[in-house]
Image: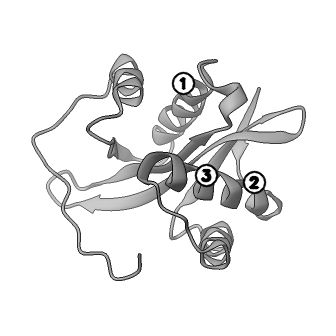
Amino acid sequence: MNIRRALLTDYEAIVFGNCAMAIETEDKSLDKERVTKGVKSILEDDTKGFYIVAEDNGVVVGQLMITYEWSDWRNGTFWWIQSVYIVKEYRRRGIYSQLYSYIKENCKNHGVCGIRLYVDKNNDIARTTYQKLGMECCHYDLMEEDFTL
């Protein structure tokens, strides 16, 4: 498995993963054109974040996106993990663990103060995976007002 930072040429695989994940996790069909523009936007502008992909024999089989949150309390940046997707046939093979190890190792080179993500309260498999990697539940609940979906 090759774990690397995504390139613009990976956008179609990432769009596929994002759309598939939305259907699986939230039963939402995303506008593929909007998602394509969003994926290309971050791939072309790393001030917004970046994607990490896992590829097997040149085929992207897993992904995650990192976005940034500045913490004045810590005088540092959190990396937020988002848009996690592993192709069904490749699940339960440790691919997410490899992606996580890759970003955790890269945190050291970028002065990152921590890693955060949100997980569906009913997704026990993901929750267990994240905890095994050292992540803990915190006392915050996620709230939002979505102006797009």
Q: Which residue is mark 3?
A: 20
Q: Which residue is mark 2?
A: 13
Residue lying farthest to the right in this orientation: 57
> Image height check: is 109 above or below 43?
above
The image quadrant of residue 119 is top left
Verify CB contact (< 8 Å) between mark 3 and mark 1. no
- Can residue 8 be seen here? yes
| Amino acid on which the number 1 mark rests in the picture | Ser
Question: Dividing the image into 4 quarters, which one contains the C terminus?
Answer: bottom left
134 and 88: which one is in front? 88
The percent position of residue 120, horizontal first and vertical second, equals 32, 42
> Image height check: is 89 above or below 48?
above
How was this image coloured? one colour
Verify CB contact (< 8 Å) between mark 2 and mark 1. no
Q: Which residue is mark 1?
A: 97
The percent position of residue 81, horizontal first and vertical second, equals 44, 47
- Residue at the image position 40 percent from the left and 60 percent from the top: 68
Identify the element where label 3 is drawn: helix
